[in-house]
Image: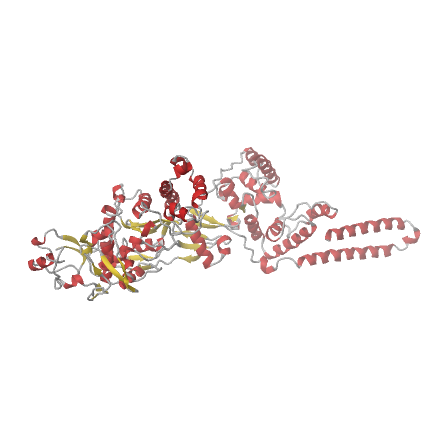
Amino acid sequence: MLKRLFSAIFRGTGKWLGTLRREFRKNSYRANFWAWIRLFAVLTVAGLVVIVGALAYFSLTLPSLDTLERIEPGLITRLYDKDGRIAHEFYIQRRIWIPRKKIPERVTQAVFAIEDRTFNEHWGADLKAYPGALFPALFGGRARGASTLTQQLAKNLFLTSERSVRRKAREFLMAVKIEKTYTKDEILEFYCNQVYLGAGAYGFAAAAERYFGRPLDSLKVEQYATLAGLLQRPEAYRPDLNPKEALARRNVVLGAMKEEGFITRAEWKQAVRASLGVAEYEQKADLGPYFTETVRQFMEKKWNEDFVYNQGVRVYTTMDSALQRYADELLPRKLHEVQLKLIYSTARAFNMSKMLHLPLDTIIRHWDVYYPRFDSLYIRSDSVAALRRFPEAHRYRHAQAALLVLDNETGAVRAMVGGENFELSKYNRALQAARSPGSAFKPFVYSAAIDNGASPGDMVNDEPITIPDPADPKKFWRPENYEPGFEGPMTMRKALYKSQNLPAIETGLKYGLPTVVSYARRFGLQHNVPAVPSVSIGSCEATLMELVSAYTAFPNGGIRPIPYFIERITDKNGRTVYQNIPQTQEVLRKEAAWILVTMLRDVNIRGTAAAIWATGFQVPSGGKTGTTNDFTDAWYIGFTRHYTAGIWVGIDDHTSMGHGHAGADDAVPMWTELMRFATRGTEPEDFPRPDGVVEAKVCPLSGLLARSFCGPANEDYYIAGHEPTEACRPELHAKKASGVDVSTANRHRDQPVIQGKTEEKKSDARVRKTF
């Protein structure tokens, strides 16, 4: 519209001047000279009114002054690891903000020389350059450049890159408003941080890192000139992709700097001979994507999406980047070994080699090709024959895994992997998957016992029991051990390191199922934990985070620190906007926690996780395996003096993985490699023994202090004040040996102490022992 208006004005003015020349030669018109002058003045004023009106019209569509005063370009949000190294970045525009006082003088000199030599004199627009830029567009051509830095900033912030008179007019007005709102230094700061310089880099600081791998204030004059040269055509002059064009453009900038007196002739000669000096750009691997996504979700929930992607905040996380990087590599590698076992199991169960007429190794190597073919030919059928021949239990399912490492003292999350591949599945199994913990729950049962006066040397019975169903007396539950058979009387310590089910159930019933559930809650389990006999062997739900957090209480003296991912967050100006406040919860007495450590240490030395010790990892450690019904879940949660780590392996839809996929098979090897890396280069540290722990030798039959006639005594630890004080007597020993109950023998040894009070424990009517 404006183009046509200006064209009409110029055409009309030209015709009017031609007529004026012809008519003015006539004597009759010379007498009316001043009349013609008045007419010309009227037309000129009218034209100016039209132009001013058009500018006024465009000004109505400009951003408000309030918007101008709140210019907030998008900045990079950087996540740092525990040692202050950059671990990840969130951004829409990759921009690193630097204040005006930190912008090197060479940057401004290069920009002024090539883009706006009158920046410090003009008031937003350089009118001397405007006619040359504007006139071609009035007659069907393209408007040229000649925009000032302020006009370029206006275009970058509020306008498009359209080449037209309309956009030029709005750019002009916008530049004037910006100059009225901000100082020259503020405009220059905005400009140097806002401009796009190719390769996804916005602003000079981000471009310096992108092309030269160095901070902006450490570059040479020729490198500043290279960056300034990008302003005209960022992608075309990229020094990493188009070095010839970039070199020529850089030298143009250097020549302009010499003309303006910013550099001497000697400096110019040296600079134009220098190479571009581009650093090879390394695309950083996505470190700990499940970890960083958890941080992102926290920030977005607490603030908003703009805070995450545009505010330029610095997030100081708890991540140990070296450990996280190793965990990112370890989990897929060890999970591949689990997948191979599942693949071999399916291939052999269905006799795929014979049915496909191919060697088994060929099928295994190209499983992604042959199993779908086999599935479509034989398995994918609803017929009874197909289901009988290819039962669900043997069909291939893709296994998953999760890994988590916490700092025992603080609860800081040092590493987390929530699945095999974040790009394929963003479901975080370390935080979101509530699974049955199986035997990994048993330490909570024995914690309830030890914290209430029991000793690891107390005798428990590994004998078959039958528990009636309270809802239907005709139904019974007869629990079994993982390994067939029963071993009879054994110590509580042995029952735990061998992971026998019956003693755990007996202990839970003895100390009360509500007590067991209460302790589980204190340990931090938040999902379904029912007060039923089977809860003692893990018939409940927990996430990997809950279990790992719970186990930190053992090496940490009974204190469970609340896990966290972020230490603090600062804004772009360095002000702290978030500070984590450490939180802890007392779970056990420190004496009970240490005794549990000794029991769980035996698991790693001679129990279900003995492979840890046998493979050479003999750093003081403890933990517990867990395997659920039908090998649905495989767990290992373990700790050293400073770290507690947990591994879960399973299938997302709760399908059985089959025999050979217990916690000791799939989780323990991964944990061992992880902790060997985590403890590298450090001296092994043992767990300090509290003063309130005593030792005693007791008779395995009477539970009293052992004497010579008691035979091999059980020597173990007690919380001071709960050890037996009465010595065994021959008649009591004889009665126990003959199977007669000795109810008077050191009565408190058979009565749990709940919250400091002695409470007689009644026998559970639902339990009937069978022999």
In the figure, residue 587 lies in which quadrant? bottom left
> How does the figure colour the protein chain or chains?
secondary structure
Question: What x and y, as percent, mark residue 326?
Answer: 37, 43
Please indicate whether residue 297 sits to the left or right of residue 631 in the image.
right
Please indicate whether residue 303 sits to the left or right of residue 10 in the image.
left
Residue 82 shows in this picture:
no
Residue 366 shows in this picture:
yes
Image quadrant holding the C terminus, namely bottom left
Name the residue nearer the viewer: 81 or 148.
81
Count of labels in the image: 0
Name the residue nearer the viewer: 351 or 589.
351
Name the residue nearer the viewer: 696 or 153.
696
**Figure check: 204 above or below 480:** above
Please indicate whether residue 139 sits to the left or right of residue 522 in the image.
right
In the figure, residue 734 lies in which quadrant? bottom left
In the figure, residue 378 lies in which quadrant? top left
Question: What x and y, as percent, mark residue 311?
Answer: 50, 54
Question: What x and y, as percent, mark residue 435?
Answer: 36, 54
Residue furthest top in the image? 273
Please indicate whether residue 194 sits to the left or right of residue 676 in the image.
right
Question: What x and y, as percent, mark residue 429?
Answer: 39, 52
